[in-house]
Amino acid sequence: MEALLKQRLGFGHYIQSIRQFREVLDPDSGPEFLPGVKVKDENFSGVPVRVYEASGGEGSLKRGLLYFHGGGWALGSARKGSYDKVTRMMSKDLDAVVVSVEYRLYPEVQFPVPYLDCLAAAKYFLSAEVLSKYSIDPERVAVSGDSAGGNLAAAVAQEISQDPSMKVKFRAQALIYPALQALDFNTPSVIQNQKIPVLYRTSLVKFWMQYLGADLSLMEQFLSNNHSSLQQPLLTPELRACYDWTTLLSPGHQKNYRPVVADEGLEGILEKVPGLLDVRASPLLAESEVLSKCPKAYIMTCEFDVLRDDGLMYAQRLQEAGVTVTSAHYEDGFHGCFSFLFWPLDFDVGKRALRDYINWLQDNL
C-alpha cells in the first residue's frame, strides 16, 4: 500500500519502491556465508551474472548450473538475500559452477526482454570457451529457476533444445513452481489458493499483465478469463488442449472445480497482447514436437500455490512427449517456500525441497 501511495504522489514506480524496501530487509550475504564458495560478478554477452565456484576438486571437471531467479519478472536479484544464499549452497553441495542471471526487470522492460537476456546468457554459458574457462563438464549442464525464473528456464530449455547451432545443450532442467501460461486464471489451484500468501491470485494476474504489456485496467476481464474466450479466433482447439486441465490434471487435483470459459470477451486482445500466445512467454503452449526435444525435467509443485497446476500440466505434457520427468509435489508446500530457509522465515518444507532438488541434480547431472 505504501509503495502504491508513493507512486501516486510521484515518487517513482511502486515496484521500484518495493525493491528499495526489500534491499533493506534482505541485504547482501557477504563472504562469511559459506566461505568455501568463490563469488564473482561477470558479464555474459552483455547480461550481468553472478558466478559461484565451489572450492576444491581442482583439475576435475565440474557440474554447471544456470539459474534464473523469481519475482514476477519485476522483483528479485541474483545478488541479494535468499537468492544469493541459496545459489551459494547449490554450488557447495553440488560441487558445481552456478551462474545466476541478473536479467532486466519490469517496469524498465517487458517481454520479451527478460527472456532474451536469459537466452543470451545461456548461449554464452554453453559456449566451449566459457565451459573450458570454468572447468565445466559439457555433459553435465542444467538450467533451473523458480516461479518467473522457472518460466524463463523452461522457455530457454525449449529454445536451446531445438537450436541446431548449439553444440552443447542442457542435459537437465529443474523448474521450481514455474509460471507457464497466462490464458486460464481459473485453474483449480488458482481458485483454491487465491488468498494464500505469498502469491495471491490478483498478484499473479498483475505480474503477468505487466510482463506482457496488457492494460491493467483489464484486470477483472483477465480474472474472468474473458481474454481467452471462445470468440478468440487465434486461440485454436490445439492451443486450448495445451492447457486443458480437465485432461492434464489428475482427478485428485481437479477436485470439484469446473472450467471457466467465456463465450464472449475481449475482442482482439490476442492481437493487442501477442505475448499471450507466444511460447517464449507461455512454455506450456509449445507443440509436442518441441517438448519431445527437451531435456529430462525435475518439476517441483506445492499444494498451496496458485501455480501448482501449471507445473503439473507441464509435467504431464512433457511425459506424453516422451521426456523423463520427476515430479516433486509437496502437500505442505506453498509458493516461495524454496527460498524460506533462513531465520526468521525458515520452514521445514523449504529445507526438504532444497535437499530433494540437490539430490536430484546430483543423481541426474
Image (cartoon, rainbow, N blue to C red):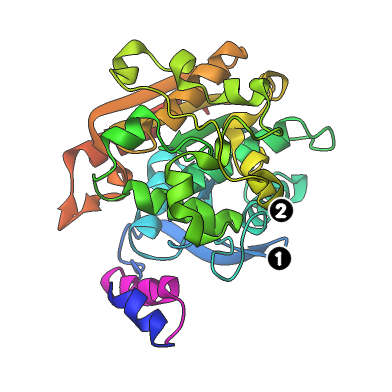
Q: Residue at x 32, y 25 (%)?
A: 329
Residue 49 position in % (x across, y down): 57, 61
Amino acid beneath label 1: Gly
Residue 1 position in % (x across, y down): 28, 72
Amino acid beneath label 2: Ala
Q: Which residue is mark 1?
A: 46
Query: Residue lying farthest left?
Result: 344
Circle on res. 197: none
Sequence-first tag of 2 and 1: 1
Task: Examine the rendered structure and indicate whether residue 300 appears above or below residue 82.
Answer: above
Q: Which residue is mark 2?
A: 120
Q: Secondary structure of the magenta portion, mostly? A: helix
How would you rate the neighbour count of disc 1 (Cα within 10 Å): few for under 14, some for 14-19, many for 20 or more?
A: few
Q: Residue at x 59, y 64 (%)?
A: 104
11 on left or right of 350: right
Query: Can residue 55 be seen from the camera position used here?
Result: no
Residue 99 position in % (x across, y down): 55, 52
Q: State the CA–CA distance, disc 2 to disc 1.
A: 8 Å
Task: Examine the rendered structure and indicate whether residue 196 appears above or below residue 120.
Answer: above
Q: Residue at x 27, y 28 (%)?
A: 330
102 on left or right of 342: right
Magenta region: 11-27
Query: Can residue 250 be seen from the camera position used here?
Result: yes
Residue 21 lies within the magenta run: yes
Residue 286 lies within the magenta run: no
Question: Which residue is nearer to you in this view: 310 or 324?
Answer: 310
Q: Are marks 2 and 1 in contact (CB under 8 Å)?
A: yes
Q: Residue at x 60, y 59 (%)?
A: 213
Question: Which residue is nearer to you in this view: 160 or 169?
Answer: 160
Task: Label 1, secondary structure: give it.
Answer: loop
